[in-house]
Image (cartoon, rainbow, N blue to C red):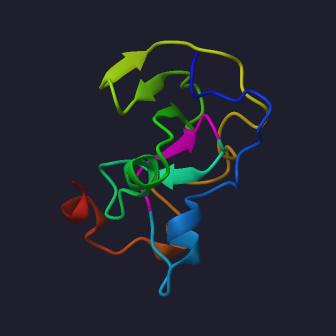
Amino acid sequence: MEGVDPAVAPSGNGCADCDAASPQGWWFHLRRCAQCGHIGCCDSSPGQHASAHAASSGHRIVRSFEPGEEWFWDYAEEVMYERGPELAAPTHHPLTQAAPGPADRLPADWANQLH
């Protein structure tokens, strides 16, 4: 699959951009760039950092970083693939990590802030 580097590990356990923000943000679900490993939040999240990373970097393929999900999304072609190449571990955020999360950053009205 073009645009996928199976050897690259994920950048962390949460959205790199939400974690780096001041104040720190929160996310609904996480996506992993299949080319560089950048973890970003999904388009339902307030920050929409995964698609922003794809647009700014040209890295068009992401994989879900949610437990039990193996699908890939191609932003350029707007196509979902049920499966793709096996990526370097870990393949999802820790099971103890809440979704949405992180739990200590969620505003009381988080559901109203989803896109």
When the figure is inspected, residue 65 is found, relative to residue 2, above or below; the finding is below
In this rendering, would 74 be left or right of 43?
right
Q: Residue at x 25, y 57 (%)?
A: 114
In percent of width and height, residue 82 lies at 47, 12
When the figure is inspected, residue 5 is found, relative to residue 17, above or below; the finding is above
- The residue closer to the viewer here, 98 or 48, is 48
Which residue is farthest bottom?
22
In percent of width and height, residue 6 lies at 74, 27
Which image quadrant: the N terminus? top right
In this rendering, would 59 be left or right of 49?
right
In percent of width and height, residue 115 lies at 21, 54
In this rendering, would 111 be left or right of 105?
left
Q: Residue at x 23, y 64 (%)?
A: 113
Q: How many marks?
A: 0
- The residue closer to the viewer here, 28 or 47, is 47
- The residue closer to the viewer here, 67 or 4, is 4
Where on the picture, by quarter, is residue 33? top right
Q: Residue at x 59, y 63 (%)?
A: 16
The verdict on residue 28 being magenta is: yes
Where on the picture, by quarter, is residue 27? bottom left
Extent of the magenta region: 27-35
In percent of width and height, residue 58 lies at 46, 44
- The residue closer to the viewer here, 96 or 67, is 67
Q: Residue at x 44, y 46 (%)?
A: 54
The verdict on residue 41 being magenta is: no
